[in-house]
Image: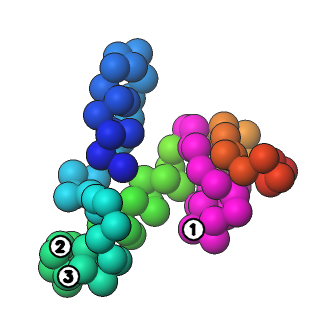
Amino acid sequence: MQEVIDKSKSYSNWNFYYTNVTRQVGNMTMASYESSLGRETSTNYPLVNFLMATEADFFIGALGSTWCFLIDGMRNTGGKVMAGYLSVNKDRFW
């Protein structure tokens, strides 16, 4: 995930928003990763990411993912129905 954030900096005409939190690397288990962040951070940063994603003018995600499907649904009900969404799933592009 960190490499995606690093590459986003080469697009100077775009604004990318992300939380400044240590990313999960390699095959580290989710339990180990969340433990390394601490209880408060591992609870709060997904909620912050969710709120940022629902306010985005454009979003790239996998509609096959429950999390991305929820984000898309919230964007549609929050006035972003015409905002761009690029699904990386070939079979889910509604």
Q: Could you say which is closer to the camera, residue 35 or residue 41?
A: 35
* Amino acid on which disc 1 is placed: Trp
Q: Vertically, is 8 above or below 64?
A: above
Q: Which mark is on residue 37?
A: 2
Helix, strand, or loop for circle 1? Answer: helix
Magenta residues? Answer: 57-79
Q: Which mark is on residue 35?
A: 3
Disc 3/disc 1 C-alpha distance (Å): 21 Å
Q: Are marks 3 and 2 in contact (CB under 8 Å)?
A: yes
Q: Relative to 59, is 89 on the left or the right?
A: right
**Label whose residue precedes the other's in the sequence (2 or 1):** 2
Task: Pick the residue in front: 63 or 24.
Answer: 24
Residue 6 visible? The answer is yes
Say whether residue 74 is visible. Answer: no
Amino acid type at image mark 2: Leu
Q: Residue at x 39, y 69 (%)?
A: 47
- Report x, y in % for residue 12: 35, 16
The residue under the point 30% across, 83% down is 31
Q: Amino acid at mark 3?
A: Ser
Q: Where residue 10 sits: x, y (%)?
A: 34, 20
Q: Residue furthest front?
A: 27
Name the one closer to the observer, 82 or 71. Answer: 71
Disc 3 to disc 1: CB gap under 8 Å? no
Q: State the image coordinates of residue 49 (x, y, percent, origin top left).
A: 39, 59
Could you classify mark 3 by the number of other residues whose Cα lies within 10 Å: few (under 14), some (14-19), or many (20 or more)? Answer: few
Is residue 44 magenta-colored?
A: no
Mark 2 nearby-residue class (10 Å; few <14, some 14–19, many ≥20) = some
In space, the residues marked 2 and 1 are separated at their CA atoms by 20 Å
Vertical relation: 7 (above or below) 85: above
Q: Is residue 74 above or below residue 91?
A: below
Per the image, the residue denoted by label 1 is 67
Relative to 18, 59 lies left or right:
right
